[in-house]
Image: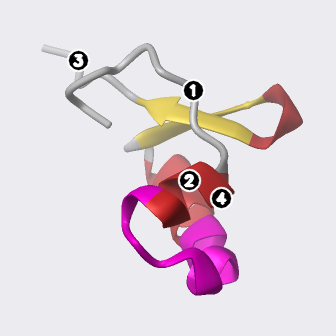
Amino acid sequence: MSQDPQRQWKALEMAHALNEPAKIKSVRVAMDEQAKTGDLIKLPNAFYKYATPQT
């Protein structure tokens, strides 16, 4: 995700990118957790994007 920080991802797209489409629920939960810690940004309509680190 950090290679294209402006790209918006759905959990299903991420699961496919990780070659784990059967584990979409686990991927979604992990992405929600990363959004809570600030590593990802959760956008409307369940899209996620990389949270660019602040310097």
User: Label 4 belongs to which residue?
Assistant: 12
Mark 1 or 3, closer to the camera = 1
Mark 4 or 3, closer to the camera = 4
Find the distance from the CA under tag 1 to the CA under tag 3.
19 Å
Q: What residue type is labelled 4?
A: Leu
Mark 4 or 2, closer to the camera = 4
Find the distance from the CA under tag 4 to the CA under tag 2.
19 Å
Q: Is residue 42 left or right of residue 5?
A: right
**Which corner quadrant of the image does residue 1 belong to?**
top left
Find the distance from the CA under tag 2 to the CA under tag 1.
17 Å
Q: What element carries label 2?
A: helix
Looking at the image, tell me whether mark 4 or mark 2 is earlier in sequence order: 4
Q: What residue type is labelled 1?
A: Gln
Mark 1 crowd level (few <14, some 14–19, many ≥20, 10 Å Cα): some
Q: Which residue is drawn at 69% across and 79% down?
A: 25
User: Label 2 belongs to which residue?
Assistant: 36
Mark 1 or 4, closer to the camera = 4
Q: Which mark is residue 40?
A: none
